[in-house]
Amino acid sequence: MNIGIVTDNTCNLPIDFLEKNDVGYASLYILRNSNHIRAIDLCTTTFYEELKVGSYVPLTSQPSVKDFENVYRDMLKKYDYLITITISEKLSGTLNSAKLAASMVDEKRIFAIDSKLTSFGLGFLVMELLEKIKSKKYTLEQLLEYAKHFYLTTKTIFSVTNIDYLYKGGRIGKAKALMGSLLNMKPILSLTEGEIIPVKNVRGNNKMIKELTNIAIERIDTMRLKRIAVIHTGNLKYGSLILEELRNRGINDDDIFYSLLDPVIGTHLGPDAVGVITQWE
């Protein structure tokens, strides 16, 4: 029995990696100048540079049903079943497009699952499924159950450091933006049960870096740390500070995935966000 994987571009894994491992994918879109552009067609570095100086915040949209339909029809030529894992349903309508496409193509052979994750959290799930499928030790049902509960073994902790950008994006009021700037308060946020929730506010960048790292690498139950990723939206300074903090905790650079955040998610967080994503087992 051959089982294939389908995901979306917010998994933050390089397209080369997905194609090398025959992982199907659909891209979300970014709306700029009245044009819908596939996120995978953008230069992420240039995107964040333009986002910092732009006078407007680009809009984003999910892949179309047709996008997933095309992927499914191509993948089903090679696989008996497909497991589709997408960005959290609470963050995007991508899962809905995936399910609608499955019902149109072959819903008995395609299973679409809400990962309740995004960025490398979703990417780590893709990597785990690839390993488990390759081992041939797991049934389809076991893989589906694993995918549904994988989010419980991950942490996605991040901070949006540019208060002015949040106000420009209409996500906080002017009074809160002004107060945050005056007090130099930095919010620490978590992706929990697929939803972004506030964890705490800290004062200053140094405190934010330390607290963000502390929470991200705090052990889940008795599990051990398996994978770790550091993401940022164009602010190399914050990314470097996180890496330095992790080195101080005994984590080697070679064990860290370090990358710009996918532009779709980055659009909503702004150009000065930073985060740590950990997987435990």
Image (cartoon, helix red, strand yellow):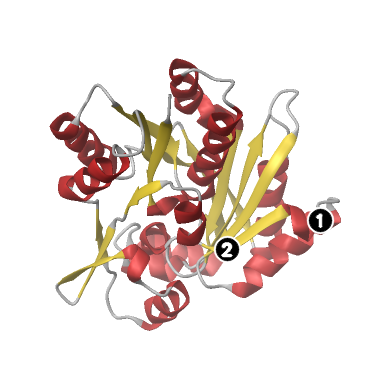
Mark number, residue 264: none
Kindly tell me whether residue 104 is visible in this rendering. yes
In the picture of the structure, the residue carrying the numbered disc 2 is 259
- Residue in the image at 38% along x and 83% along y: 53
Circle 1 SS class: loop
Kindly tell me whether residue 12 is visible in this rendering. no
Q: Is residue 6 above or below residue 14?
A: above
In the picture of the structure, the residue carrying the numbered disc 1 is 252
x%, y% of residue 202? 62, 54
x%, y% of residue 85? 39, 37
x%, y% of residue 200? 57, 45
Q: Is residue 32 above or below residue 108?
A: below
- Residue in the image at 56% along x and 72% along y: 235
Q: Is residue 35 above or below residue 88?
A: below
Q: Which amino acid, by three-letter code, is at mark 2?
A: Ser
Circle 2 SS class: strand
Q: Quadrant of residue 68?
A: top left
Q: Quadrant of residue 279?
A: top right
State the CA–CA distance, disc 2 to disc 1.
16 Å
The total number of labels drawn is: 2
x%, y% of residue 251? 81, 52
- Residue in the image at 45% along x and 31% along y: 193
Q: Earlier in the sequence, mark 2 or mark 1?
A: 1
Relative to 45, 55 lies left or right: left
Q: Is the residue marked by circle 2 packed among few (<14), some (14-19), or many (20+) residues within 10 Å?
A: some
- Residue in the image at 43% along x and 24% along y: 1
| Closest to the observer, 77 or 58 | 77
